Image (cartoon, rainbow, N blue to C red):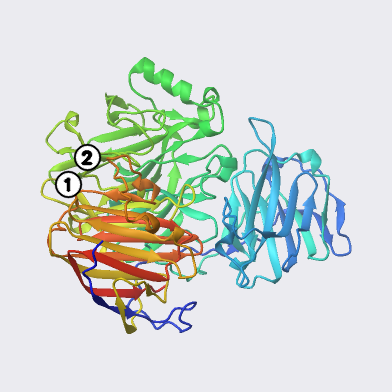
């Protein structure tokens, strides 16, 4: 690529970077959009009976038989944590439970993602408790660990109080009264093996077994206080991620529900174990975390994506019971639901508590106040990802996904659903409808998008992906909501190492022909620091950047129709370029792409229409860029995180298109620019506030 950029002046707005600059940050100009989190402090006291105790003088002993293992049990112990030079057992119920301190491989991110928190020397000592469960279907014994990296504790070493709580529906680790890891069991320990236990007196001074299980209560008035920024947010913890997002603007409030994910879809012995958590905001600057809208309360429960909707003037959320991930179809309610549908031609309303099989299919929860939700227990359709919406004429409709397909309608949520078009949409994981001005749109989950004029019948929907004018930008399962001032926002999650990732929200732009573009939402642009330092760099040389998370902005003036531009995000000079990333814009073909730096000379990534995979969040291209034939602005958000094990890159082009990428293992230390027949001005790099 011919270089015509010359010398660029970089205005670095720095307020210090702890690791790179060694300076303390100055206060940011504003707080930005932040989430007021619920307290993670729990009252774990109980009136339940302690049935066995051990201490450093009596460090082993018998256990009395539990009357009913389904009522669960709790083990509370006081331990002195130290850095283990080998695996050290702290507590054991042979054949049932092993609690240990051990060193974890700092390169092993599988499931638990322990290396999200490392000690100063790079090591990853962990506390882990592994329970053995006999599964209900296969009848085999499987191990279910919960654990934490010690580095996530405010004081990793020394004395700590630990509560291990097995309730039947949940297997949870509390340390010093904070919930730090949990999973969702399938099956129970073999009660006949719970006949003895022991502690290691080198670490544990006292332990007690409580029966039935403790029921911890969240302590009010003890908020976390960290107030994380919303963009690229993940729930607090080492293995916690945002899954499928659904949203609705109702009574001046934007409600965002997301499938809470631990372990990248590997909780509940690989069945997912997802449930809906809930955030809300009135202005997109101040967000509130609420109690879970649809919690897991029974062993067979694991939820699939639905949609929030308003019915009978109440906020509701639909979802599917993904029970076939656990039980064979014939042991669920699906045969009975389909038998009724085939016989009547429409669905019925079934009380799951009165049916023969384990509940499967579509259900919903209802809220009287928009905050607290109650499960109805009604099964109204056999599909397992029900996308319910109210169309512009006020009619109740549903797009059936996962196990069913088609467009359905009913006068009531509770049954009576009849199929309007069994062949559209084509089915899949998650489809969503939205209406904007003169156009209707249906999103197909990961890769599909259809559009038509509002007055046309459903048969007129056109495939936007086939024409190369989709708006997929790296997000998975995006959801669309109309908010105040006739604005539309799109929320979703980014694929990282496995299913689930950070939350991303962008605003939509509608062009005169109905095409949808995307841009950054002003309210959610992360806060930058406010100390300015001027640095000069040649465009053909890599420029050191003293902070790994930053906002890059510049203006572009095309001097010819076939101009090209690239920005390379590079690691430090002593590291190989295999993790480096290039963002490139080709104005002749009106394309932009993310790719590897080592292949930038001859590698053209594919768009979604061409078979590319934007939803993977890695290398891909977008096409038919609008408004890049005239002066335009590029903004690039680069966010590094130890939890991510890499960097998120979010680029906005001309305020009309965005594209996001996750770059595993990349931590940016240098920038390099190149351009041909394009002039770059007003180049700024602004480190992000935390």
Q: Position of residue 667 (x, y in %)?
A: 45, 66
Q: Position of residue 611 (x, y in %)?
A: 32, 39
* Rendered residue at 43%/62% (across/down): 647
Q: CA distance from mark 2 to mark 1?
A: 9 Å
Residue 281, can we see it? no
* Rendered residue at 17%/64% (across/down): 677
Q: Position of residue 423 (x, y in %)?
A: 28, 25
Residue nearest the observer in this picture, 271 or 476: 476
Residue sticking out furthest to the front: 2
Residue nearest the observer in this picture, 163 or 234: 234
Can you identify the residue that label 2 sits on? 464
Kindly state the secondary structure of the residue where label 1 is placed.
loop
Can you identify the residue that label 1 sits on? 515
Kindly state the secondary structure of the residue where label 2 is placed.
loop
Marked residue nearer the N-terminal end (2 or 1):
2
Crowd rating for badge 1 (residues with CA inside 10 Å; few <14, some 14–19, many 20+): some
* Rendered residue at 30%/43% (across/down): 608
């Amino acid at each position: 690529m011919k270089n015509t950029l010359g010398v660029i002046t970089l205005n670095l707005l720095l307020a210090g970077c702890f690791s790179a600059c060694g300076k303390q940050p100055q206060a940011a100009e504003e707080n930005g959009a932040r989430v007021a989190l619920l307290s993670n402090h729990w009252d774990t006291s109980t009136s339940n009976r302690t049935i066995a105790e051990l201490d450093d003088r009596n460090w082993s002993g018998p256990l009395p038989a539990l009357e009913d293992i389904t009522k669960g049990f709790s083990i509370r112990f006081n331990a002195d944590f130290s850095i283990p030079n080998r695996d050290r057992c702290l507590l054991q119920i042979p054949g049932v439970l092993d609690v240990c301190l051990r060193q974890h491989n700092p390169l092993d991110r599988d499931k638990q993602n322990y290396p999200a928190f490392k000690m100063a020397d790079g090591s990853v000592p962990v506390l882990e408790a592994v329970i053995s469960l006999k599964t209900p279907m296969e009848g085999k014994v499987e191990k279910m660990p919960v654990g934490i990296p010690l580095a996530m504790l405010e004081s990793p070493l020394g004395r700590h109080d630990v509560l291990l709580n097995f309730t039947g529906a949940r297997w949870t680790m509390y340390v010093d009264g904070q919930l730090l890891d949990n999973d969702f069991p399938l099956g129970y320990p073999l009660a006949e093996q719970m006949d003895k236990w022991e502690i290691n007196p080198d670490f544990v001074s006292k332990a007690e077994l409580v029966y039935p299980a403790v029921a911890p209560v969240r302590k009010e008035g003890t908020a976390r206080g960290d107030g994380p920024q919303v963009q690229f947010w993940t729930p607090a913890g080492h293995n916690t991620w945002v899954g499928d997002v659904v949203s609705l603007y109702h009574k001046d409030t934007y409600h965002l529900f997301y499938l809470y994910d631990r372990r990248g879809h590997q909780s509940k012995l690989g069945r997912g174990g997802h449930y809906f958590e809930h955030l809300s905001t009135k202005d997109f600057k101040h967000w509130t975390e609420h109690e879970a809208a649809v919690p897991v309360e029974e062993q067979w429960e694991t939820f699939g994506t639905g949609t929030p909707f308003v019915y009978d003037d109440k906020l509701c959320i639909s979802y599917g019971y993904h029970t076939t991930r656990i039980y064979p179809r014939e042991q669920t309610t699906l045969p009975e639901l389909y038998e009724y549908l085939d016989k009547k031609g429409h669905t019925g309303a079934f009380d799951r508590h009165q049916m023969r099989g384990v509940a499967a299919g579509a259900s919903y929860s209802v809220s009287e106040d928009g905050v607290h939700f109650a499960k109805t227990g009604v099964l109204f359709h056999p599909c397992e990802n029900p996308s319910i919406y109210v169309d512009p004429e006020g009619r109740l409709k549903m797009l059936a996904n996962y196990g069913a397909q088609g467009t359905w309608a009913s006068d009531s949520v509770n049954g009576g659903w009849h199929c309007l078009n069994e062949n559209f949409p084509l089915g899949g994981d998650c489809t969503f409808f939205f209406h904007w001005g003169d156009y209707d749109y249906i999103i197909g989950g990961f890769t599909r998008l259809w559009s038509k004029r509002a007055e046309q019948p459903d048969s007129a929907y056109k495939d936007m992906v086939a024409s190369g004018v989709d708006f997929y930008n790296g997000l998975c399962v995006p959801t669309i909501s109309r908010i105040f001032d006739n604005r539309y926002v799109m929320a979703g999650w980014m694929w990282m190492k496995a299913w689930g990732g950070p939350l991303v929200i962008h605003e939509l732009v509608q062009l005169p022909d109905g095409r949808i573009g995307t841009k950054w939402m002003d309210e959610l642009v992360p806060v930058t620091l406010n100390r300015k330092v001027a640095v000069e760099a040649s465009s053909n040389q890599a420029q050191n950047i003293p902070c790994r998370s930053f906002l890059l902005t510049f203006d572009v003036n095309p001097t010819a129709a076939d101009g090209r531009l690239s920005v390379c995000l590079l690691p430090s000079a002593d590291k190989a370029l295999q993790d480096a990333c290039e963002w490139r814009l080709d104005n002749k073909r009106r394309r932009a792409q993310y790719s590897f730096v080592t292949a930038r000379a001859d590698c053209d990534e594919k768009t979604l229409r061409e078979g590319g995979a934007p939803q993977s969040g890695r290398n891909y291209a977008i096409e038919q860029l609008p408004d890049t034939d005239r002066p335009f602005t590029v903004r690039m958000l680069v966010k590094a995180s130890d939890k991510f094990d890499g960097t998120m890159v979010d680029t906005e082009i001309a305020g009309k298109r965005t594209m996001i990428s996750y770059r595993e293992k990349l931590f940016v230390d240098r920038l390099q620019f190149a351009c041909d027949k394009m002039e770059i001005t007003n180049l700024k790099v602004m480190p992000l506030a935390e």
